[in-house]
Image (spheres, coloured by chain):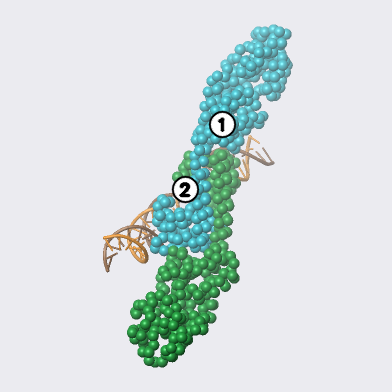
Chain colours: A green, B cyan, C orange, D brown
Amino acid sequence: MGLETWDEIRTAYQVARLGTVSGAAEALGVHHATVIRHVDALESRLGVKLFQRHARGYTPTEAGQDLMQVAQVTAEQFSQLAGRLRGHGSAMTGELTLTTVESLTPLLVPVLAEFEVEHPDLSVRLLADQRLFRLEYGEAHVAVRAGARPDEPDNIVQELGALRSALCAHRRYVTAHGPLGDDFGAHDFVGPADERHRAPFYRWLAAHVPASRVRFRASDARACIEAVEAGAGIGFVPLWRVRNNPDLVEMRPAEADWAVPLWLVTHVDLHRTAKVQALTARLKEAARTWP
Amino acid sequence: MGLETWDEIRTAYQVARLGTVSGAAEALGVHHATVIRHVDALESRLGVKLFQRHARGYTPTEAGQDLMQVAQVTAEQFSQLAGRLRGHGSAMTGELTLTTVESLTPLLVPVLAEFEVEHPDLSVRLLADQRLFRLEYGEAHVAVRAGARPDEPDNIVQELGALRSALCAHRRYVTAHGPLGDDFGAHDFVGPADERHRAPFYRWLAAHVPASRVRFRASDARACIEAVEAGAGIGFVPLWRVRNNPDLVEMRPAEADWAVPLWLVTHVDLHRTAKVQALTARLKEAARTWP
DNA sequence: CTGGAATCTTGCGTGAATGCACAATAGTTT
DNA sequence: AAACTATTGTGCATTCACGCAAGATTCCAG
């Protein structure tokens, strides 16, 4: 209680610094009367005289000099702060956090690593977990989402290509069971624990493959892929993973219907910052080279 | 340019600290609409988003966190300042300057020395010079003036007794010239350089002693007294000085008309401070013991 | 000593900032 | 699932702070 109006302190500071009400008023861009009222209010609330008034101007008392010194430091702090804050919008410094689902991290990590090298003052953080990190609370600047188009308010959504998958199996499985024809009865499949899974390729699976032929089921997408790579059967594997694993055999090429759309999501408050703009541009550029 | 409204920074600080507009509004004692408007104004003027808005509250961005840290320091500084400022009015610390004419310093010095011992945190300063120090510009807190009652505006004037003088001479002079009767023709007097001097005892001198009998004249009061003490003739010497000098002889006792009134003057802005009150009380107490 | 310049001071009218009320949204609890 | 609470967002009326201008005082110069 006492110094709750910081603007009045600022006014008193200018008066103490310049010595006259008129000078302070000009420096502050306000009227003399306002300056006088601010000082009067401050003094009466504090119960202390800050200035001695005379016809030549205002001379600060000891209390006024004390206030002036404190306010001087404050003014400098705020000035520096203003400079830094402008930078926050346009400079490439500080942290930059991207969140996504775990299964996409192998795709994103190379892009992020390259991006971090290009911007040394930027500390890039990748937040991947089972749970969905929300942008609203400032946990991340950018999110890469898969599946249905996000439509949360205050979020800006951009297309980021699609994640195409092929029906694959380990070459050991192929040598044992032969290629995949139109008859699925002789083959083992890998699928989701939940038969009603919403992913487009799993809807295709449920529609075209008898449930009895899905011999391995897992709730986690990564587990399903690893099962395929271990030779448990035929399942959907993202094309980028197929390229990196020579032991995998494409039993049926990727169909357009199986593609899972990817979305680049940013919070509207952060979307215009240079950092976010640079990263989203980089991600969209990289997405064009994805299979 | 940018952070000129300190109140808005204070508002944003509370929002960043408490996380919600409502909480900040309650802490600040204003309506939450005001808080929103302050933050909006600050952001639009800076061109930087300070907060991410969501239904749970406001989460500070990096810029907002930066502002919060700076404002936190400022808030603490101002809080400490407020404490100190209250002290300035009621505590006995810092400087305390008293100004007077040179001739009164021997009377005041003992009182000030005693006062300084009683208040160790107080640094007492005595400003005495030929020129008159004015209280208006903060050069001194208290002034002791002699002569006509000061009537400068914004100054508080209190009576401080009177300076009584007697007509004295050195005992050598008395042995040489004899005592002072009603005939002044046989005596030598010491008087002011300006015959029309306004001091009451000098008016008496001009009225009762022929100018030709004033054999020694000096413009400085101290010089006149020293001339008397040196045996140059009969002159006016303050009673306190007579008491301290056994060589002086009172040729004619002090008359009430000769007394020079003393005034205790303080600036209205500083009059109520504890320091000034203590000193003026001490001075008035000491004045009662003066001859 | 008299005019002039600069300053502070104060009453008055206007406008911008504030408070209020209601709406909308999301999270929480029953 | 539904009611409840706590939050933000916005249009409208009001008030308070601001700018303006005239007055008062002091200091300075000729």
Question: How many residues crowd around disc 2 within 10 Å: few (fewer than 14), some, or many (20 or more)?
Answer: some
Label 2 marks a residue whose chain is A
Q: Is residue B250 left or right of residue A265?
A: right
Q: Nearer the viewer, residue B60 or B132?
A: B60
Residue B91 image point, x, y percent: 51, 35
Q: Residue A282's quadrant in the figure?
A: bottom right
Q: Which residue does the numbered mark 1 point to in the structure image?
A: B120
**Amino acid at pointer 1:** Pro
Name the residue: 50% across, 43% down.
B82
Quarter of the image that includes the N terminus of chain A: top left
Residue C10 image point, x, y percent: 48, 42
Q: Is residue A243 left or right of residue B246?
A: left
Q: In this rendering, which labeled residue sits more in front, label 2 or label 1?
A: 1
Please check whether the numbered discs 2 and 1 fall on a single chain: no
The CA span between labels 2 and 1 is 33 Å
Q: Which residue does the numbered mark 2 point to in the structure image?
A: A4
Q: Secondary structure at mark 2?
A: loop
Q: In the image, is residue A281 above or below residue B54?
A: below
Q: Nearer the viewer, residue A213 or A194?
A: A213
Instruction: Decide if residue B208 is in sight here.
Output: no
Name the residue: 36% across, 87% down.
A208
Residue B78 image point, x, y percent: 51, 47
Label 1 marks a residue whose chain is B
The residue positioned farthest toward the bottom in the image shown: A182
Question: How many residues crowd around disc 1 within 10 Å: few (fewer than 14), some, or many (20 or more)?
Answer: few
Q: In the image, is residue A124 above or below residue A191?
A: above
